[in-house]
Amino acid sequence: MTVSHLAMHMSDGIVNAPISLLFGVVAIVALGICAWRAREELDERTVPLAGLVAAFIFAVQMVNFPILPGVSGHLLGGALAAILVGPYTGALCVAIVLIVQSLLFADGGVTALGTNITNMAVIGVAAGYGTAVLLYRLIRRGRDSVAVPVVGALAFASAVVGTVCAAMGFVLQYALGGATSTSLDSVAAYMFGTHVLIGVGEGIITALTVMAVVRARPDLVYLLRANSKSAEVTA
């Protein structure tokens, strides 16, 4: 196996069985916490949006875009989901997409499902949303309003950070129990470099989507509802 065959959607056999089992447990525990906490994020207005977010992520994950020769990327959706519907609900949305893709479309190995969920639905969502909250609170200090393009810019940055952090989650798993002959240094360099580029593509899609929703229904965007006590969003 060569580095060029590694991808964010891990297949079976890239990490050994004990590490796959370990992160399977991590994923189950994390999703249990998310299911419990998601009740605080959802109401009759936001439940339909969560369904739309999951469907959108599923659709765009099926479309790959070229990054380098022999390398393609797709939207992970962690930052997008967290910004729109909240980190706990967002993690559940991404996890549901990964489960369906693995079981019905063979996109990502079944034994690697725990590692994929940990990377994309837990690490990616947490890193992306944490970045979005930090930037948003810094931007709105002393301001009565925040422009929509500014929200788009922070959504872009959050998506890039979330994508790279999710990729580094894979590097950690490979360091703990890589089952191939590819060196850790090569894996780390490849995953970081390609996922910075993938993150740019993800950032553009995330920014455009978030700005469209903010312009249409800012009251439904979780980031704004949870972190704006007085600031308004303006065009």
Image: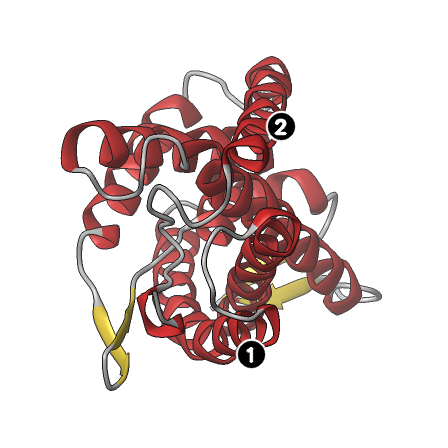
Which x, y percent locates residue 116?
45, 42
Pick whichever, 66 or 126, lies toward us: 66
Which residue is pictured at 39% across the width and 53% down the height? 76
Query: Which residue does the image show at 51% across and 40% down from the upper left?
Result: 16
Looking at the rendered structure, which numbered label has been put on residue 189?
Answer: 1
The three-letter amino acid code for the residue at tag 2 is Val
Q: In this view, does 55 lie to the left or right of 173?
A: left
Residue type, label 1: Ala
Residue 221 appears in the rendering: no
Q: Position of residue 63 (x, y in %)?
A: 17, 59
Quick one: label 1, few (<14), some, or many (20+) residues within 10 Å?
few
Earlier residue among tags 1 and 2? 2
Q: Which residue is drawn at 59% across and 68% down?
A: 184
Which residue lies under the disc numbered 2? 26
Q: Where is residue 185 in the image (x, y as percent from the top left)?
A: 61, 75
Instruction: Spot the residue most to the front.
Output: 181
Observer able to see residue 97:
yes
Is residue 73 or residue 187 the one in the foreground?
187
Q: In this view, does 35 lie to the left or right of 217?
A: right
